[in-house]
Amino acid sequence: MVNTMTLSENLEDYLEIILALQIRNKVARSKDIASALDIQRASVTGMLKKLAALNLINYEPYGFVTLTPKGETIAKEITSRHTVFRQFLIKYVGLDEDVADDTACRLEHAVDNDTFSKFKKFIDGLDHQLS
């Protein structure tokens, strides 16, 4: 597992969004990122520069944004955490999808790798018992 705890929630959210845009469109653009986050494009530029400085994205002003292999690994891990928490909250807690999605977003950033690994094993065991 990659150590994502050194990244801020905002940086992690950017990586998640860039991954989703890359999957959908092959590349991300700053205007698409701004739209997904419902913020101004000027706000996106500073965060993209930070991610590029950390070697998590490839970025040139007015160009496309793509994840580096390191950035993609982290983005996939964050997305996986989100999915696990979201599915748990819907399936076992009975939350509606919007509430589960918002809660999963908060949990994915707060839980350390060891705790998440144990949580996932617990859920996998629970799924196995109930199937």
Image: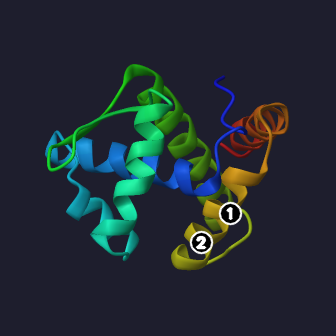
The quarter in which the C terminus is drawn is: top right
Measured as percent of width and height from the top left, residue 79 is found at 51, 45
Q: Which mark is residue 80?
A: none
Label 2 secondary element: helix
Residue pointed to by mark 2: 102
**How far is mark 1 from mark 2, CA to CA?**
7 Å
- In this view, 114 is above or below 101: above
Q: How many marks?
A: 2
- In this view, 85 is above or below 77: below
Measured as percent of width and height from the top left, residue 108 is found at 67, 51
Label 1 secondary element: helix
Residue pointed to by mark 1: 106
Residue type at mark 1? Answer: Arg
- In this view, 131 is above or below 103: above
Mark 1 neighbour class, 10 Å CA radius: few under 14, some 14 to 19, many 20 or more: some
Measured as percent of width and height from the top left, residue 110 is found at 77, 53
